[in-house]
Amino acid sequence: MDQFTVKEGKTIAIISYITFIGLIVAVIMNNSKNNAFAQFHIGQSFRIVIASLANSVLSWFLPSSLMMISTIISLLILVLIILGIVNAVNGKAEPLPVIGTIGD
């Protein structure tokens, strides 16, 4: 990706990682611009949201003695969010570990 595309889509890419509402706002903002850098990070953020929803469903079915598993997964998801924001700020389009290439 060229530097102009990265610079133009950086704000949208960062917004996409800030909660589910941020993802929706980023999709709406990128709808007219169709920026490839922002689109990449929107896809990565969408994968994080799906993983969070799966973790929530998992926590419903785990007995209370195994809730530590859901807590650890939640912390790993937080790490993925931070990695995504850092990549977006630095202008990198690198897939996130573990979930970054799912669905490609």
Image: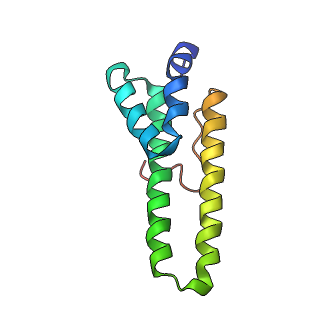
Colouring scheme applied when the structure was drawn: rainbow
- Left or right: 60 in relation to 68: left
Label count reads 0
Residue 19 placed where, x, y %? Answer: 50, 45
Residue 3 placed where, x, y %? Answer: 58, 15
Out of 1 and 34, give the one closest to the viewer: 34
Say which residue appears at 46% left-offset and 38% top-offset: 22
- Left or right: 61 in relation to 77: left
Residue 97 visible in the picture? no
| In the rendered image, the vertical position of residue 23 relative to residue 67, given as above or below | above
| In the rendered image, the vertical position of residue 12 relative to residue 100, given as above or below | above
Residue 103 placed where, x, y %? Answer: 42, 52
Q: Residue furthest left?
A: 32
Say which residue appears at 46% left-offset and 81% top-offset: 61
Say which residue appears at 49% left-offset and 37% top-offset: 16
Residue 42 placed where, x, y %? Answer: 45, 38
**In the figure, residue 25 lies in which quadrant?**
top left
- Left or right: 34 in relation to 47: left
Q: Residue furthest top?
A: 4
| In the rendered image, the vertical position of residue 5 relative to residue 27, given as above or below | above
Residue 65 visible in the picture? yes
